[in-house]
Amino acid sequence: MRRVRIAEWILELVTTRERAASLAGDLVEDGPGHGVFWFWATVVRAAGTMLWREFASDWKRMLRLGAAGLIVEYLGMLILLLLVSPILGLMGMAYGSGMIPKLISGAFGLSAMVVSQFAVGWWMARRTPGRELVPCAALIGLDSLLTVVVNLVWSRQTSVLEVLLGITAFQIVNVSLFAGAVTARRRRMS
């Protein structure tokens, strides 16, 4: 029954607790003849369908909110990096241009990105009660599109495959965006 609880949790991200429990229960009843892969594929497909339905019902607002979130995210990262850059500059003077300053600089950059995305996820979720993940998905779609356009227009050496691989790798960092939205949703629902 552990998989039922996990399936309910996934579905609760995009629908009400009661509807998620009902759908997970229906899938468990239908599942024995289909197998484990069918069960999880159906859970993911159902969650994606619900997310898409919410987006399609008010797509203009969701795209506007996603675009605003993208701007706020980049401004937040910029502010965090500007606050940290004097410290990084002093470290560079103290340690030179070796591996340690580069690792610390990369860690600060990644931390700024994660903190900024979490805050943006929280901010957008508070503006769309009941549809918290939809503007996050819109933001990721817009960010991916912007990345493709910028790389293809301004970076002549980058192939389409390299751009797509970069976008795919970057999606791992977007977990913090969804974590912010899920945290806001959980707090609102409790």
Image: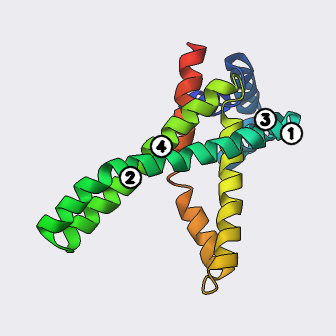
> What label sits on residue 73 in the rendered view?
none
- Which image quadrant for residue 143? bottom right
For the point 52% across and 54% down, the residue is: 172
**Where does label 3 land, which residue?**
50
Which SS class for mark 3?
A: helix
Q: Residues within 10 Å of mark 3 (few under 14, many from 20)?
A: some
> What label sits on residue 56 in the rendered view?
1
Pair 3/4: label in front? 4
Whichever of callouts 3 and 1 sits on the residue coming sooner in the sequence is 3
**Where does label 2 land, which residue?**
81
Q: Give the camera-side residue of 12 and 118.
A: 118
**Where does label 4 land, which residue?**
116
| Amino acid type of the residue that numbered disc 2 sits on in the rendered structure | Leu
- Which image quadrant for residue 185? top right
Which SS class for mark 2?
A: helix
Picture layout, residue 160 above or below residue 62: below
Picture layout, residue 96 above or below residue 71: below
Q: Position of residue 46 (x, y in %)?
A: 77, 38
Whichever of callouts 3 and 2 sits on the residue coming sooner in the sequence is 3
Q: Give the camera-side residue of 93 and 187.
A: 93
Whichever of callouts 2 and 1 sits on the residue coming sooner in the sequence is 1
